[in-house]
Amino acid sequence: MRLFARRSFLIGVILVGAVVVAALLAGWLAPFDPVKNNFRNRLGAPDDVFLLGTDRFGRDVLSRILFGAQVSLRIGLVVAVFSGIVGALIGLLSGWWRGVDVWLMRVMDGLMAFPGLLLAIALAATLGPSETTVIIALTVAYTPRTARVMRGAVLVARAQDYVEAARSVGVRTLRLLLRHVLPACTAPLVVQQTYVFAIAILAEAVLSFVGVGPPPPQPTLGAIIADGRDTMVEAPWIALAPGVVIAMLVLGLNLLGDGLRDALDPRMRRITS
Amino acid sequence: MLRLVIMRLLAAVPVLLVVSLVSFGLTLLVPGDIASEMAGPTATASDVARVRAELGLNQPPLVRMAQWYGGVIRGDLGRSILLNQSVGAAVLERLPVTLSLTFMGLAVACLIGVPAGLLAAAKARRWPDQVTMGGAMLGLSLPDFWLGLLLIWIFGVQLHWLPTGGFVSPSTDVLGWLRSIALPAGSLALTQLGPIARMTRSAALEVAGSDFIRTARAKGLTEGRVFTRHVLAGAMVPILTVVGIGFGLALGGALVVEQVFSLPGVGRLVIGAVLRRDWPVIQGGLLLTTCIFVLVNLGVDLLYLWVDPRLRESS
C-alpha cells in the first residue's frame, strides 16, 4: 500500500501500534497489580524488579502506566468516535439545510469560543469525576471542530455535478445524503477524527492531572504524572515516564493523521510533505 | 471599513450569548445539591439554608438566570463565599499573571516558529525542512504540563539555574519576574511552536509559487530577501490566523501550566474552585476567560484588514 511507503506514516503506525499492543496486553504484561499498595517499596528507583520504579504507595509504575495507557486509549477512541458521529450529523444538517445552518453554526461558534480545555475541566467538574464524565466533557469540547470540517466537506459535495444529477432524477434526500454526500465527506472526517483522537488523549491527561479525571485508584497517565509531581526531587521517574507514553501516542496519531490526509487528498501533498 | 468592523463586532454577540448560556447552565447540570456541597460535610441544616439563600438557589432557575444576567450586565459576577471576595475582583487580580504568561509563551513561540517555518519552506524537502518539521511535530505532541515538569527537573532540580515555582511580580523585581516566568513560558512556547512553524511553512510554500515572487527573484533579489520580505508578507494572514488560534491554545495551556509552577493566575483560581466546588468562581472564570479569548480573536480579525489590503477593498 502506498501509504506505508511514507516514512512518517510508518513511524506513526509503529508508535501507536506499540502502545496499543502494550495496553491491550496490560493484564498479561504488567508485572504487578497497578493498584495494590506495598509500603515497604515506597519511591523505589528503577531496578530489575520494578523496571520503572515505584510510587509513594509502593505501586509498580510500569504496571500503572500499562493500565493507564488502556484508559487513555479507550477515552481517546470513544471521544473520537462520538464526536465523529455527532459532528458528522451536525455538519450534514448544517451543510445541507441553510435554515438550520445559521443556528447550528452559531451554537458551534459559541462552543468553540471557549478554550477547549477550560470548558472540558468545568464540565467534568460539574458532572462529577468518572470516565463517562470525561468522555462527555471532551466530546462536547471537541465536536464543534468536527462539525465545521464536516459542514465544509458537505458544502463542497453538494455543489458536485453527480449530486445535482442524483437530485434531479428524484433521489430522496435521506438517500442522497447517505449514499452520495456522506461518502464524499468521509476522507476529511476520518483525518479530522485522527487528530481529535490525539487531542482527546492530551486533554484526558490534563483533566486527570488537575484532578477531574477518573477517580483514584484508577491509574491514568495524567494521574500518575500528578502523583509524581510532588516527588519530583526524590523520584522523578514517576512523573517523567508516563509523559513519554503520552508523547508516543499523540505523536504517532498526528503522524497517522498527516499520512492519511496526504494519501486521501493529493492536492495537499505538495504543501505538506 | 467601519461597516466591516461593526459587522465583526455584531458577529461576536451570538457567540457571547452561547458562552454565557453555557456558563450559567453549568450549575443546572450539577447532579447533587450545590448548597449542601458548598457548605461542607460538617454544615448544619441552617448553614445549608444560609448558603442556599446567599447563592439565590431557593429561587426557580429562570429567576436565577435573570438575576445572573442582570449581574453580568452590571459587571457583577457574584461572590465567592469561600474566598470572601467578589468573583470579578478575584479573576481580575489574577489575570495579569495568566495573560503575561500567555503572551510571553506565544511571543517566544512566534519568534522561533515563524523563522523556522520560513527556513523550512525555503529549503523544502531538504534536511533543514525535515529537521524543523520533525521538531515541530514532536513539540505539538508533548503535553505542556508534563514538559513543565521536565523543565523543572532539568533546570530547577538538576542544574539549580531557575526557581521551580512561585511568582515574583514585575513591579517589585523585573529580573526575578523573568526568572519566575522563564520555565512556564518556555514549556508553553515549546508546545505552541509546532502549529506556528507548520502553518508558516505551508503558507510560505503556497505564496512562493505566485507570480510576484517570480518577479522578485527576476529583479535580482537574494533568496533570503525574497523570503523575509515578500513571501512573509504574502503569508501573513494564515500566520496571523494560527497565532490567533494559538492564543486560545496558549491561554488554555497557561491555565494548566500555572498549576504545575504554582503561579497565582486564573487557572489556579478556576481549578481550585473546581476542586472546592465554588460555583460562582467557576462560572465567572469561564465567562471572563472566554470573553478575553473572543476579544483577542476579534482583534486578530481586525488585524487581517490591516495586513491584507485586499480584504479592505472587498468589503
Image: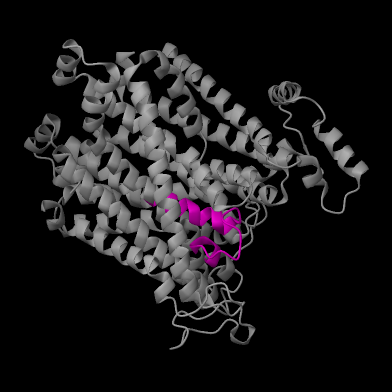
Task: Give the magenta range.
Answer: A198-224
Residue A216 can be seen, yes or no: yes
Residue drawn at point x = 15 percent, y = 37 percent: A267
> Where the N terminus of chain B falls, by quadrant?
top left
Query: Considering only vertical position in the picture, is A55 above or below A187?
Result: below
| Foreground of the two, A116 or B100 | A116
Residue B83 can be seen, yes or no: no
Residue drawn at point x = 28 percent, y = 20 percent: B310
Colour scheme used in the picture?
one colour
In reply to whether residue B203 is colored magenta, the answer given is no
Residue drawn at point x = 43 percent, y = 49 percent: A200
In reply to whether residue A212 is colored magenta, the answer given is yes
Where is residue A138 drawn, in percent x and y?
A: 49, 44
Where is residue B70 drawn, in percent x and y?
A: 73, 21
Residue drawn at point x = 91 percent, y = 47 percent: B44
> Where the C terminus of chain B falls, by quadrant?
top left
| Foreground of the two, B289 or A52 | A52
| Foreground of the two, B222 or B258 | B258
Where is residue B206 drawn, in percent x and y?
A: 18, 37
To which quarter of the image does residue A155 belong?
top left
Question: Magenta region, mostly helix, strand or loop?
Answer: helix
Q: Is residue A203 left or right of residue A101?
A: right
Q: Residue furthest left?
A: B218
